[in-house]
Image (spheres, grey):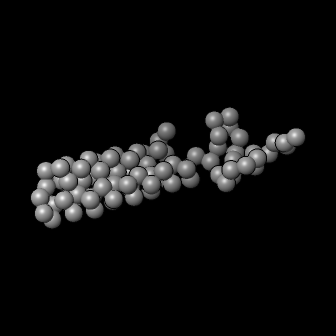
């Protein structure tokens, strides 16, 4: 699990940015509301980046079979 440290930091940063953005939108006035929207968008982008990082780091399924990540029956088993 030591390899998941980077995505964990990205996840914490994404949630923190979204939280700060929501607080700015609730309590901010004028330009701070716009800054809150931008902060939430950045948080969502960080979250998407974290999901991509985890997906590239875990190419194996829970059963240990290597998967291509593209979907379908590409795990080496024959269908039918």
Residue 6 visible somewhere in the drawing: no
Residue drawn at (71%, 41%), measured in percent from left and top? 65
Q: Position of residue 79 (x, y in %)?
A: 84, 42
Classify residue 60 as left or right of residue 12.
right
Classify residue 79 as left or right of residue 35.
right
Q: As drawn, which residue projects farthest toward the bottom?
A: 31
Q: Position of residue 73 (x, y in %)?
A: 76, 47
Residue drawn at (64%, 43%), measured in percent from left and top? 60
Residue 44 visible somewhere in the drawing: yes
Closer to the camera in the image, 78 or 58: 78
Residue drawn at (38%, 54%), measured in percent from left and top? 44
Quadrant location of residue 48? bottom left
Q: Position of residue 25 (x, y in %)?
A: 20, 54
How many callouts does the rendering have? 0
Q: Position of residue 40 (x, y in %)?
A: 30, 55
Classify residue 25 as left or right of residue 44.
left
Quadrant location of residue 30? bottom left
In the rendered image, the quadrant that contains the C terminus is top right
Closer to the camera in the image, 52 or 28: 28
Classify residue 69 as left or right of residue 41.
right
Q: As drawn, which residue projects farthest toward the top?
A: 63
Residue drawn at (26%, 59%), measured in percent from left and top? 37
């Amino acid at each position: 699990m030591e390899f998941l440290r980077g995505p964990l930091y990205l996840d914490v940063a994404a949630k923190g940015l979204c939280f700060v953005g929501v607080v700015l939108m609730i309590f901010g006035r004028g330009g701070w509301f716009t800054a809150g929207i931008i902060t939430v968008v950045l948080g969502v982008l960080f979250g998407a980046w974290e999901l991509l990082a985890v997906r590239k780091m875990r190419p194996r399924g829970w059963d240990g079979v290597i998967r291509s990540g593209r979907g379908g029956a590409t795990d080496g088993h024959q269908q039918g």
